Amino acid sequence: MKTITAEPYAFEFSPAETALVIIDMQRDFLEPGGFGAMLGNDVSLLRSTIEPNKKLLEAARKHGLLVVHTREGHNASLLDLPLSKKVRGKGQKTIGDAGPMGRILVRGEEGQDIIPELYPIAGEHIIDKPGKGAFYATDLEHILRQRGIKYLIVTGVTTEVCVNTTVREANDRGFECLVVADATGSYFPEFQRVGLEMIKAQGGIFGWVAQSAQVLEGLQS
Ligand code: TIU
């Protein structure tokens, strides 16, 4: 077993039973001119997560962790897009419409793809998810159980939306989750802070929180 210094206490894990799960590091959420920016969000708040994610991905590859990348997105038919999700927010443009980088959050479109800095390599899993949580309507649980995974190191965007939803889903399924603070990001600094607080409160009600440097140190130990 290896140990990562974390809150609320040390996170113990075995690399062979651990997956790095990178949530929705997609062009539409992180790049200027994408869907996130179009909604009026400051994407620079998310872009600070790219470097820590690059280092974690490199370390995960080196140490043989299972690597899972997720992408929020819908079938081109939009038959997997609930009307509630399409119309919520009353935006001028919404999911499925023509956006700056192809149809917004539609699978196979440029904007829906993962940013080049973190692009998956052969052997890594890409989970296309229609919801905020990565377990809903995807193969993720099967893949993790088939590989004997018990521990998840979770990063990505946004902290209070897709990261938190995924960690809660994983927690209810018995996975031990560590969320990497500087490798997760939110468009709202307050939600970043509180989103992480909620995970580690009450003795780690949903899991653990650590900095990427602590994760790298734990992997190398
Ligand atoms: N990936 C993810 O978090 N999807 C979102 O829509 N997040 C927002 O914060 N809007």
Image: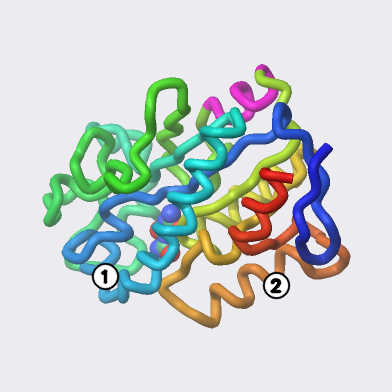
Classify the position of the N terminus by image quarter: top right
Q: Is residue 142 left or right of residue 49?
A: right
Picture coordinates of residue 122, whole percent (x, y): 39, 22
Q: Residue at 68% of width from left, 53% of height from top? A: 217
Q: Is residue 93 above or below residue 105?
A: below
Picture coordinates of residue 50, whole percent (x, y): 40, 58
Pointer 2 or 1: first along the chain: 1
Q: What secondary structure is the stretch in magenta mostly built from?
A: helix
Q: Nearer the viewer, residue 85 or 122?
A: 122
**Most distant residue in the front direction:** 221
Q: Which residues are magenta?
A: 139-146
For badge 1, the amino acid type reads Leu
Q: Decide whether residue 150 is among the magenta residues.
A: no
Which residue does the numbered mark 1 point to in the structure image? Answer: 39
Q: Is mark 2 within 8 Å of ligand 1?
A: no
Corner quadrant of residue 93: bottom left
Quadrant of ligand 1: it is bottom left
Q: Is mark 1 within 8 Å of ligand 1?
A: yes
Q: Is residue 74 left or right of residue 160?
A: left
Q: Decide whether residue 145 is among the magenta residues.
A: yes
Q: Residue at 45% of width from left, 33% of height from top? A: 127
Q: Residue at 65% of width from left, 50% of height from top? A: 167
**Most distant residue in the top direction:** 146
For badge 2, the amino acid type reads Glu
Label disc, if present, on residue 206 of the rendered structure: none
Classify the position of the C terminus by image quarter: top right
Label disc, if present, on residue 197 of the rendered structure: 2
Q: Few, some or many C-alpha atoms within 10 Å of disc 2 (few <14, some 14-19, many ≥20)? A: some
Corner quadrant of residue 45: bottom left
Picture coordinates of residue 154, whole percent (x, y): 60, 49
Q: Few, some or many C-alpha atoms within 10 Å of disc 1 (few <14, some 14-19, many ≥20)? A: some
